[in-house]
Image (cartoon, helix red, strand yellow):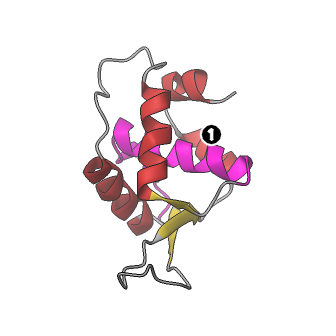
Amino acid sequence: MSDTSPFESISLTNQLVLLSVAELARQDETPVQTHDLRRYCQQQVADIDTGVIGTISEADVIRSLYRLEDEDLVDEVHPSETSPTGKGRPAYTLATSDEVVYDGVADELQESIIE
């Protein structure tokens, strides 16, 4: 990563996804698949007092994860096993310390999500 904070260039939606991954990691619930992460994010959005973040779709979560992976904030974990149809769903883990995440994300997200 460069000297510039990646949090300056990522949207609130991306920050929400990242903070959710950090919270799930803190609860030992990572690696997490996108559909489970979307569900967690949607639960958190209901408590956020900002109109900037609306409904979170699975596509929003996937796009956010790709962006966060490019910024070296999350890592994709390829499944060791595939489903009976031959499809393995990737899962994601935090690639940085949770302190970096908590220090970098927007205050209104932290106040609403961190327990």
Q: Residue at x 60, y 64 (%)?
A: 31
Q: Looking at the image, is 46 positioned above or below residue 37?
A: above
Q: How many numbered discs sit on the rendered protein?
A: 1
Q: Looking at the picture, tell me which residue is in the foreground, 57 or 102.
A: 57
Q: Which residue is mark 1?
A: 103
Q: Quadrant of residue 54?
A: top left
Give the x, y percent position of residue 48: 45, 20
Q: Residue at x 59, y 65 (%)?
A: 95
Looking at the image, which residue sits at the far top? 49
Q: Residue at x 42, y 72 (%)?
A: 89
Q: Quadrant of residue 88?
A: bottom left
Q: Residue at x 42, y 57 (%)?
A: 34
Give the x, y percent position of residue 23: 64, 43
Is residue 27 covered in magenta? yes
Is residue 43 covered in magenta? no
Instruction: Please state the extent of the stretch shown in magenta in the rendering.
Output: 1-28
Looking at the image, which residue sits at the far front? 84
Q: Looking at the picture, tell me which residue is in the foreground, 29 or 112.
A: 29
Give the x, y percent position of residue 60: 28, 48
Give the x, y percent position of residue 42: 42, 33
Helix, strand or loop at mark 1:
helix
Q: Amino acid at mark 1?
A: Asp
Please say whether residue 5 is visible from this viewpoint.
Answer: no
Overall secondary structure of the magenta stretch? Answer: helix
Q: Quadrant of the C terminus?
A: top right
Please say whether residue 77 is visible from this viewpoint.
Answer: yes
Q: Looking at the image, is 86 positioned above or below residue 75?
A: below
Q: Looking at the image, is 101 positioned above or below residue 52?
A: below
**In the image, is 28 to the left or to the right of 41?**
right
